[in-house]
Image: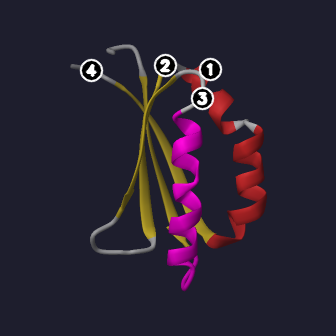
């Protein structure tokens, strides 16, 4: 598993939209787990801020992440639920040891 792509993505809800966004983000998990190149895809919520979410993802490679990001499901998700999101970040990592 040393050459896998690790991704940490954070998503922050618009004020008052925390519950809605949480439910929406949860729909991404079962779909991601069926995608080519999937290794791990976990959703977390902050213990201090109910509107802050973190995805910890592992993909076979950059190509698998790109397939996930550009899938019809991901695009439809953005169109349907994008208004619930205040901010998001995505950081890629490579395992060192």
Name the residue beneath numbered marker 4.
96
Q: Callout 2: few (<14), some (14-19), or many (20+) C-alpha neighbours within 10 Å?
A: some
Nearest to N terminus: mark 1 or mark 4: 1
Up the image or down, 82 lies above or below 32; here it is below
Residue contact between numbered discs 3 and 1, judged by CB atoms under 8 Å: no
* Magenta stretch, residue numbers: 14-33
Residue 89 image offset from top left, x and y in percent: 52, 52
**What is the C-alpha distance between the residues marked 4 and 2?**
16 Å
Residue contact between numbered discs 1 and 4, judged by CB atoms under 8 Å: no
**What is the C-alpha distance between the residues marked 3 and 1?**
12 Å
Nearest to N terminus: mark 3 or mark 1: 3
Residue 10 image offset from top left, x and y in percent: 47, 55
- Label at residue 35: 3
Q: Callout 3: few (<14), some (14-19), or many (20+) C-alpha neighbours within 10 Å?
A: some
In which quadrant of the rendered view does residue 6 lie? top left
Q: Nearer the viewer, mark 4 or mark 3?
A: 3
Nearest to N terminus: mark 4 or mark 2: 2
Q: What element carries label 3?
A: loop
Q: Residue 50 vs residue 33: left or right?
A: left
Name the residue beneath numbered marker 1.
63
Up the image or down, 82 lies above or below 20; here it is above
- Label at residue 60: 2
Residue at (41, 19) in percent of width and height: 4
Nearest to N terminus: mark 3 or mark 2: 3
């Amino acid at each position: 598993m040393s050459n896998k792509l690790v991704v940490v993505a954070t998503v922050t809800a618009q004020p008052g939209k925390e519950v809605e966004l949480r439910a929406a983000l949860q729909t991404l998990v079962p779909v991601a787990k069926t995608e080519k190149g999937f290794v791990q895809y976990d959703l977390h919520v902050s213990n201090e801020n109910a509107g802050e979410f973190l995805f910890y993802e592992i993909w076979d490679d950059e190509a698998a992440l790109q397939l996930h990001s550009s899938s019809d499901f991901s695009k439809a998700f953005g169109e349907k639920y994008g208004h619930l999101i205040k901010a998001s970040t995505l950081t890629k990592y490579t395992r060192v040891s």
